[in-house]
Amino acid sequence: MSDTFSALILTQDNAGKTIAEVRQLTNDDLPEGDVMVAVDYSSLNYKDGLAITGKGKIVRTWPMVPGIDLAGTVLESDSTDYVAGDQVVLTGWSVGEKYWGGYSQRQRVQSKWLVPLPDGLDSQRAMAIGTAGFTAMLCVMTLEDAGITPDKGTVLVTGASGGVGSVAVAILAKLGYTVAAVSGRPEGEAYLRQLGAAEFISREEMAQPPRPLERQRWAGAIDTVGSTLLARVLAETQYGGCVAACGLAGGADLPTTVLPFILRNVSLRGVDSVMCPVAWRKKAWGRLVQDLPADRLGEIGHIISLEELPELADEIIAGRVRGRVIVDVNR
Ligand SMILES: NC(=O)c1ccc[n+]([C@@H]2O[C@H](COP(=O)([O-])OP(=O)(O)OC[C@H]3O[C@@H](n4cnc5c(N)ncnc54)[C@H](OP(=O)(O)O)[C@@H]3O)[C@@H](O)[C@H]2O)c1
């Protein structure tokens, strides 16, 4: 094993601007933790884009190795739960924000953050799913928990060409739901239909400020966008429907009224992947093996290197990335 390895490091200059560069590190540079992982793959999520570009206050300690998820093989372990050679996956727990994350060929982490890589997945597929796909699964499980079965009607997915959205469309279609996809990219309609969307709706149409109640169209929805678009989704959700909200790609505000809740029994359920309990994590990863078709993942993901991350970070924040970006840290 070589003494040095590559990692993307974020620092701040005197003006507070975030600088991203690939540097060589040694094991002594790594933070404390009871497991050292040889990272195979990480991925690029919207939050990583905010961290690398400095456009969102994501990074809480400097310098930072970003990357909110990783998959790889245990190199050394002081934990009784893992031994060298185990394959593991990590998402959330403020990794890549407060603790060093996945954009490194090696990382030292807490064993309690890890999940064994489920049978049926390799590390590349795990990161094709990544935090975004894992969150999409949590959103689907939230709708199921609210009783939204395929016979109840159409389920809407917003920000559908993005990472969470693409995986959500593919899972819902596989489970037999009729899926409507909202996207700001008309050129992406064929892609979304290939993933299983039966209906394509323009973001422009959905972003119009709604009346407090609109025509009832959706049995459920997975929203990655927030703001006025989420307000419209709520106003259009049918009696007894549920909206699983996980994102803010369009803004953190929510200009709505209580009418969908008190007159239509609509529920708005929040979905968080970062502090999600371990038992749910294991369940969600198991469901991803079962309910996300492997061929769909191939269409959703493409692979980049550590060096390409700063450019792709700009792209994801500009809303120009389609599907999932897998980071091969050894490329
Ligand atoms: N709660 C959690 O634990 C959790 C976990 C993962 C992600 N998230 C959040 O979920 C959101 C999506 O994450 P992601 O990784 O899938 O990001 P992503 O790949 O960038 O996807 C976001 C999508 O939202 C749409 N969009 C972008 N800007 C928009 C705007 N101004 N107005 C309306 N739609 C816009 C775009 O889809 P179209 O081009 O198809 O419209 C874009 O592809 C982010 O806000 C992220 O922070 C939350």
Image (cartoon, helix red, strand yellow):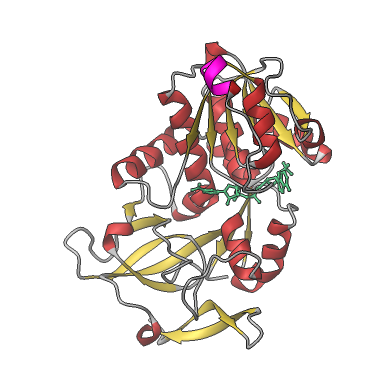
Residue 44 versus residue 131 in the image, above or below: below
With 245 as the anchor, is 4 left or right in this view? Answer: left
Looking at the image, residue 273 lies above or below residue 114: above
Residue 21: x and y in percent read 61, 81
Residue in the foreground of this view, choosing between 168 and 205: 205
Q: What stretch is highlighted in magenta?
A: 260-265
Residue 261 colored in magenta in the image: yes
Q: Residue at x 43, y 38 (%)?
A: 289
Q: Residue drawn 54% across and 65% down? A: 58
Residue 159 shows in this picture: no
Give coordinates of residue 255: x percent, y percent. Answer: 66, 37
Q: Can residue 107 be seen in this view?
A: yes
Which quadrant of the rendered structure holds the C terminus? Answer: bottom right
In the image: residue 205, left or right of residue 117:
right
Picture coordinates of residue 174, whole percent (x, y): 54, 26
On the rendered structure, is 209 left or right of 262? Answer: right
Can you tell which quarter of the image residue 23 is in? bottom right
Report which quarter residue 183 is drawn in: top right
68 up-or-down from 294: above or below: below
**Which of the 4 image quarters holds residue 152?**
top right
Q: Decide: is 158 above or below 320.
A: above
Residue at 55% of width from left, 58% of height from top?
43
310 magenta-colored: no
- Residue extending farthest to the top is 151
Residue 106, position as x, y percentages in the image: 42, 74
Q: Nearer the viewer, residue 151 or 103?
A: 151
Q: Dividing the image into 4 quarters, which one contains the N terminus?
A: bottom left
Number of labels in the image equals: 0
Who is closer to the viewer here, 43 or 219? Answer: 219
Q: Main secondary structure of the magenta part?
A: helix
